[in-house]
Image (spheres, grey):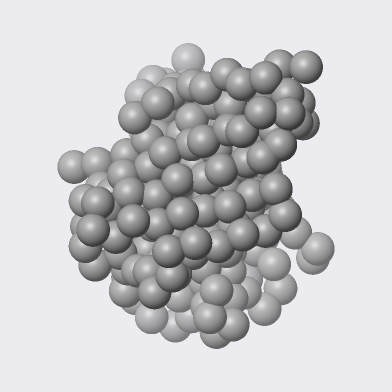
Amino acid sequence: DQQVKQNSPSLSVQEGRISILNCDYTNSMFDYFLWYKKYPAEGPTFLISISSIKDKNEDGRFTVFLNKSAKHLSLHIVPSQPGDSAVYFCAASGNTGKLIFGQGTTLQVKP
Amino acid sequence: GAGVSQSPSNKVTEKGKDVELRCDPISGHTALYWYRQRLGQGLEFLIYFQGNSAPDKSGLPSDRFSAERTGESVSTLTIQRTQQEDSAVYLCASTDLGTGGLGYTFGSGTRLTVV
């Protein structure tokens, strides 16, 4: 039972363009959502989060959008840079204190 | 310490052997989590410790897996009678739920290979 789904295993964009990574969830009890970034041979690092009471959170080049009715969130990176190339994980939490992660999307930003 | 430390970073073991993986969380972090990532897959929750509460073991895949945590410090994940499907990167994370955030800090993981 995959409660958090990232249906695109990979995404390739040109440097300077926008990267949009998508995530869907099934559990309506989730109330906090996060994005993590992972480089090879390193642990995931926290990138940005959003509470269910908001529909948008922005931090520099990174913006997360939440559509509760559609149970969908997305991460926008603009402008994309080659250093953004990594695996991006979407994660969600309810009242259990633990995060449920998606399968990840590998982003490649081409110079 | 400054970050979450995991050891060993790599472990190759023979099928049927027991292995023990160690995690040193960030000092003062009350919550500690173990996840694993098998090749080509996402992060799979294994177990969660929060303070003195009973751990949430709901993600442990079989009774060959167990974990302990001493107070709010070191945790060990033990896999008995390892199988090839146990091969994965085992990730530990910690956070201070008391601050109201859920931004885990992950270690670099232990890459376990069962041959």
Residue A70 spot, x, y in % from top left: 24, 51
Q: Residue at x 51, y 35 (%)?
A: A20
- Looking at the picture, does residue A48 appear above or below residue B63? below
**Which quarter of the rendered picture does the N terminus of chain A lie within?**
top left
Q: Residue furthest left?
A: A1
Work out whether residue A62 can be spotted: yes
Residue A37: image quadrant is top right
Q: Residue at x 63, y 41 (%)?
A: A77
Q: Is residue A4 left or right of residue B21?
A: left
- Looking at the picture, does residue A39 appear above or below residue B44? above
Q: Residue furthest front?
A: A17
Work out whether residue A97 can be spotted: no
Q: Residue at x 58, y 69 (%)?
A: B95
Residue A26 spot, x, y in % from top left: 21, 51
Residue A104 spot, x, y in % from top left: 46, 34
Front-most of residues B106 and A30:
A30
- Looking at the picture, does residue A60 appear above or below residue B100? above
Q: Is residue B89 left or right of residue B56?
A: right
- Looking at the picture, does residue B17 appear above or below residue A67? above
Front-most of residues A20 and B33:
A20
Front-most of residues A58 and A48:
A58
**How many numbered dots are placed on residues in this image?**
0
Q: Residue furthest right?
A: B2
Q: Residue at x 75, y 59 (%)?
A: B3
Residue B60 spot, x, y in % from top left: 31, 49
**Which quarter of the rendered picture does the C terminus of chain A lie within?**
top right
